[in-house]
Amino acid sequence: MKIGIGNDHAGVEMKMQIMEYLKSLGHEVVNYGTDTTESCHYPLIGEKVGRAVAAGEVECAVLICGTGVGISIAANKVNGVRAAVCSDTTTARLVKEHNNANIIAFGARIVGIELAKDIVKAYLDADFLEGRHAVRVAMFEEIENRSGD
Ligand code: RB5
């Protein structure tokens, strides 16, 4: 799978390790930065990765900031993005099964690297369950359409 990854200065070290982990699982990884610990603006990275996912440049993506929250809020402003912050593996599985999340986010200041790897694996191993969940996920797009009113 072709997977995007992006982070702010708080997530650089974890991003490097998650990139290696994804490659070890056989995935192609597209790195959208940042690669330095110099302070940067996470909304810009969240938007860049969100647009890459929405455009189909990558199938899904991983976002990392201090908490996972700010960068996912930015990504979720892009139409078609369903970014979910996860700090546990059960949530990571369910955001794919029920919400068809196309971005998973977590906080480098919240979860350790081993849990972060497990979160990524739980998300990637899960499948969207369709059915009643598809009806609800379609409603996200309806909200986006109404937002243009
Ligand atoms: C950066 O200090 C921090 O605000 C950012 O990484 C993130 O936690 C925002 O949600």
Image (cartoon, grey):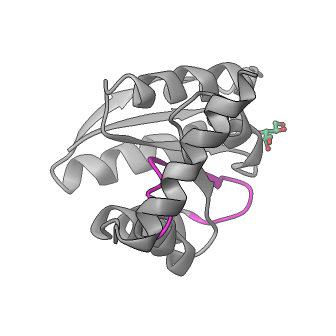
* Quarter of the C terminus within the rendering: top right
| Image spot of residue 63 (x, y percent) | 55, 42
The answer to whether residue 146 is seen in the rendering is yes
Q: Is residue 59 left or right of residue 14?
A: left
Q: Is residue 126 left or right of residue 134?
A: left
The answer to whether residue 105 is seen in the rendering is no
Predominant SS of the magenta segment: loop
What residue appears at the point 46 percent right and 23 percent down from the top-left corner? 32
Q: Residue furthest left?
A: 26
Give ligand 1's quarter of the image. Answer: top right
* Quarter of the N terminus within the rendering: top left
What residue appears at the point 34 percent right and 72 percent down from the top-left corner? 129
Within the magenta stretch, is there residue 100? yes
Q: Which of the pair 141/115 is nearer the observer?
A: 141
Q: Is residue 42 left or right of residue 89?
A: right
Within the magenta stretch, is there residue 107? yes
| Image spot of residue 27 (x, y percent) | 20, 46
Q: Which of the pair 81/43 is nearer the observer?
A: 81
What residue appears at the point 67 percent right and 19 percent down from the top-left corner? 44
Q: Which of the pair 28/11 is nearer the observer?
A: 28
What residue appears at the point 54 percent right and 48 percent down from the top-left corner? 14
| Image spot of residue 28 (x, y percent) | 21, 37
What's drawn in magenta, residue-wise? Answer: 98-112
Q: Quadrant of residue 107?
A: bottom right
Q: Is residue 57 left or right of residue 76?
A: left
